[in-house]
Amino acid sequence: MYYGTSTARRKCVCCNRYDIAVVGGGIVGLATARELVLRHPNLTFIVLEKEKELALHQSGHNSGVIHSGIYYTPGSLKARLCVRGASLAYAYCDSRAIPYRRCGKLIVALDREEVPRLKALYERGQKNNVKQISLIDARSIREREPYCRGIMALDSPYTGIVDWRLVALSYGKDFQQAGGAIITGFEATHIAMAAESPAGSSEGLKYPVAVRSSTGEEVRCRFVLTCGGLYSDRLAEISGCRAEPRIIPFRGDYLVLKPEKSYLIRGNIYPVPDPRFPFLGVHFTPRMDGSVWLGPNAVLAFKREGYRICDFNSNDFVDALSFRGLHRLVMKNVTYGLGEMYRGMFISAQVKILQKYIPELGHNDVVRGPSGVRAQALDADGNLVDDFAFDGGVDELGRRVLHVRNAPSPAATSSLAIAEMIADELEARFTL
């Protein structure tokens, strides 16, 4: 595993200057840093990560699915990136001997009311050039998932599972082997134009941007790329960019199937999306370690990295509740939100929904499992920002900074394709 520079060596490393500093050591930041150093081997790069290890948050707290690109609007950036990203992800895992399973996915219609939406989803997948999808009947559902009940399903055998944190760490290893540097434990709290050259430097302001940490350490660079995930809006603000879109953290709590009941699930089982609700709904997800996750729900987290119900940060809490976009989202989805909270508190309520797909599932067959926190970007009108958002500025600093304000799900699946897109954007803005 590659965690970055040791504390003992950090002073030496931080005296150096770099052409580009990438703030954020999650899967998107690492994939992009890797892409950049491979494209520009004569430039110098550094990744700055606030945690002591890489890819600890969204990259390490997700369902682990390799998505195929069914859900997204035909022709949209998300659709193109997901379809290409899935192919790149499988090829990358093969090249690095990273284990994965192409276990497939069924999107299951429970009744006739859901069938038109399922067929529309199938047509969307075809327009997106998703590989190997088909519509199957109830009998074929049982052939693939003997314990699943539904009247029709969209079968996506190209969907798989992988440990995305393992993939992210591999990106970091590639980056370092290509000459890039990584510093962990560096929480960027200040991005500004440097007032003067570093002591002892004869290069003037060749590296005019200063990135400072919460402990006062400083890295100088020519350009900055931020891939901050849950903190992407705050990183943009400290460099003088606008406050929106705002990141609102939503925690998703999973249940885990007891090992003796793992025979109930072979592959991914998902619901037909309901356009009335902002999130997808609970599903069944096998994991690389042999476990099966059930869920998640989606509730407001009171801390941006709060994986437990009791986790609380006053700054994060006030920041979220003072944002009018959240007020409007809540008002549009009051009933749905209360239902999610109720299901998060009572296992039996969540199991009741899961039993619609697997009737043999019982309350005693599950235990509480892990949680993840999703960085959901919201605009002031309470709309979920569903596509990629970039930001920079018009002043001298703004022309040297590129912020990835939103890299929505499926960012892990799309990470290598996203990296290509971000590298293209960065090259165009900074004329590398």
Image (tube, rainbow, N blue to C red):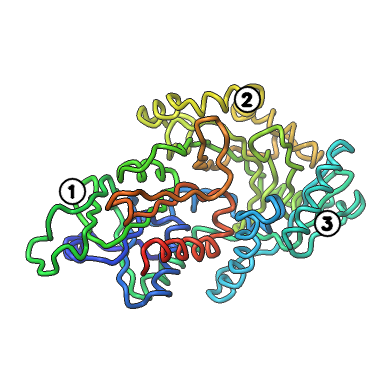
Q: Residue 242: x and y, percent? A: 38, 39
What's under tag 1, amino acid-wise?
Gly
What's under tag 3, amino acid-wise?
Arg
The disc, 3 or 2, on the residue closer to the chain's N-terminal end is: 3
C-alpha distance separating marks 3 and 2: 38 Å
The dot on residue 144 is 3
C-alpha distance separating marks 2 and 1: 43 Å
- 317 with respect to 86 (left or right): left
Residue at (14%, 69%) from the top-left corner?
Answer: 203
Residue labelled with disc 2: 332
Q: Residue furthest front?
A: 394
Camera-side mark, 2 or 1:
2
Dot 1, crowdedness within 10 Å: few (<14), some or many (≥20)? few
Camera-side mark, 3 or 1:
1
Q: Residue 199: x and y, percent? A: 8, 61
Residue at (89%, 38%) from the top-left corner?
Answer: 112
Dot 1: element: loop
Looking at the rendered image, the quarter that the N terminus falls into is bottom left
Is 23 drawn above or below residue 88 in the view shown?
above
